[in-house]
Image (tube, helix red, strand yellow):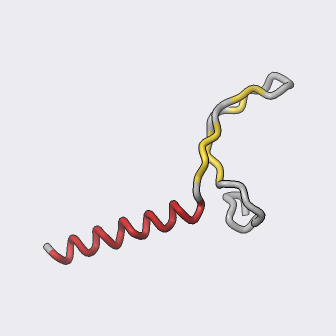
Amino acid sequence: MKKLIVIALVAIAMISAVSNAYALVSVRGYSRSNGTYVAPHFRTSPNSSVYDNFSY
């Protein structure tokens, strides 16, 4: 039982570390000036590095 609890805590810590590394920001849907609709989506938080983005 203790082994299972330790494994669960390690898994939670790993998930937390990964989600904080990318710091996702939600973007609401909007219409561009040319009438194109952009659906709601997630992106990484803006910063000066290009190496921690999804597209890298």
Horizontal and vertical percent for residue 8? 28, 68
**Quarter holding residue 14:** bottom left
Residue at image x 22%, y 71%?
5
Check the image and report above or below for 45 versus 8: above
Horizontal and vertical percent for residue 18? 51, 65
Residue at image x 75%, y 26%?
31
In the rendered image, the quadrant that contains the N terminus is bottom left
Check the image and report above or below for 13 versus 23: below
Does 56 sit left or right of 7 as displayed? right
In the rendered image, the quadrant that contains the C terminus is bottom right
Most extreme residue toward the left is 1
Does 55 sit left or right of 17 as displayed? right
Most extreme residue toward the front is 47
Most extreme residue toward the top is 35
Horizontal and vertical percent for residue 32? 80, 28
Residue at image x 73%, y 60%?
47
**Quarter holding residue 48:** bottom right
Most extreme residue toward the right is 34
Horizontal and vertical percent for residue 51? 72, 68
**Quarter holding residue 44:** bottom right
Q: How many marks?
A: 0
Residue at image x 61%, y 48%?
25
